[in-house]
Image: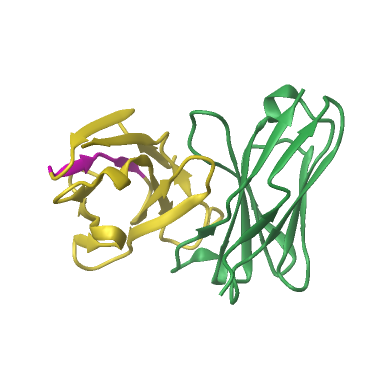
């Protein structure tokens, strides 16, 4: 049973560019959440997708957007990249919006903005 | 507002000794509490959770955690540490009540555990 997968593993972008990160949830999971983990910090919640809609959003600007597809996979898009967007981006999946179940995390995408 | 505090950035223990990684939380309503572990250049691995019931929760790899409502704490423990337990540990909390923050996890800053031989 494959766990949560993310692609790419690493990414280097220049300020002002746009980036798309991808996530496939664990089998049987229907909810995807995205977190940003800056160096030396705990993960910070970006947003959550359930039934192809954004259900919750953390304190992140509109430059951060996402999408969930009918097969429950998800994308995170970041526009107009800033140096401060450099971080490990983690995707987590769960069942039923994580109400009773723990979230399972992927290995992350390391984004470096130069 | 919901928050998690991990008061120790680093915990160092000798192999074979018991270990404790501390966590306190603040949440409106009843908390759901989680511990995750992160190895270098890896994502987070789930260790254990407290939802309801027995205050002592047992998880993966011999870890356990004790929920203390009066002290709003959820400390992670292991009776006998292994060198392979060395990693970054995160405590997380979320609200149990249905609401706008449903499913959202709030993480602490993490505690680096080093177990020396």
Nearer the observer, A17 or B107: A17
Tell me the residue at 83%/26% (across/down).
A14
Nearer the observer, A71 or B87: B87
Tell me the residue at 75%/38% (across/down).
A11
Q: Is residue B72 left or right of residue A92?
A: left
- The chain that appears yellow in the image is B
Q: Is residue A49 magenta?
A: no
State the image coordinates of residue B47 (x, y, percent, origin top left). Answer: 36, 57
Q: Main secondary structure of the magenta part?
A: strand
Q: Is residue B15 left or right of residue B28?
A: left
Task: Indicate whether A32 appears above or below B22.
Answer: below
Count the marks.
Answer: 0
Quadrant of the image containing the C terminus of chain B: top left
State the image coordinates of residue A109 (x, y, percent, origin top left). Answer: 66, 44
Nearer the observer, B28 or A66: A66
Tell me the residue at 52%/46% (across/down).
B42
Nearer the observer, A110 or B71: A110
Q: Is residue A33 left or right of residue A74?
A: left
State the image coordinates of residue A110 (x, y, percent, origin top left). Answer: 66, 39
Task: Indicate whether A3 appears above or below A20.
Answer: below
Q: Residue furthest right?
A: A17
Quadrant of the image containing the N terminus of chain B: top left
The hue of chain A in the figure is: green
Query: In this picture, which residue range is highlighted in magenta?
Result: B17-26
Q: Is residue B55 left or right of residue B87?
A: left
State the image coordinates of residue B112 (x, y, percent, origin top left). Answer: 35, 34
């Amino acid at each position: 049973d494959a766990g949560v997968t993310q692609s790419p593993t690493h990414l280097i972008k220049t300020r002002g560019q746009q980036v798309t990160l991808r996530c496939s949830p664990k089998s049987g999971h229907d909810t995807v959440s995205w977190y940003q983990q800056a160096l030396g910090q705990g993960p910070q919640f970006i947003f959550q997708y359930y039934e192809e809609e954004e259900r919750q959003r953390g304190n992140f600007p509109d430059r951060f957007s996402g999408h969930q597809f009918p097969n429950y996979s998800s994308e995170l898009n970041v526009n107009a990249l800033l140096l401060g967007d450099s971080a490990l981006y983690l995707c987590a999946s769960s069942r039923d919006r994580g109400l009773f179940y723990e979230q399972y995390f992927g290995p992350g995408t390391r984004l470096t903005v130069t | 507002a919901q928050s998690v505090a991990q008061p120790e950035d680093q915990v160092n223990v000798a192999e074979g000794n018991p270990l404790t990684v501390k966590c306190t939380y603040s949440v409106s309503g009843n908390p759901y509490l989680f511990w995750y572990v992160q190895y270098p250049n890896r994502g987070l691995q789930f260790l254990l959770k407290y939802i309801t019931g027995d205050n002592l929760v047992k998880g993966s790899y011999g870890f356990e955690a004790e929920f203390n409502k009066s002290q709003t704490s959820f400390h992670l423990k292991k009776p006998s540490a292994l060198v392979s337990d060395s990693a970054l540990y995160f405590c997380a909390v979320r609200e149990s009540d249905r609401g706008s923050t449903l499913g959202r996890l709030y993480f602490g800053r993490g505690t680096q555990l080093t177990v020396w031989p």
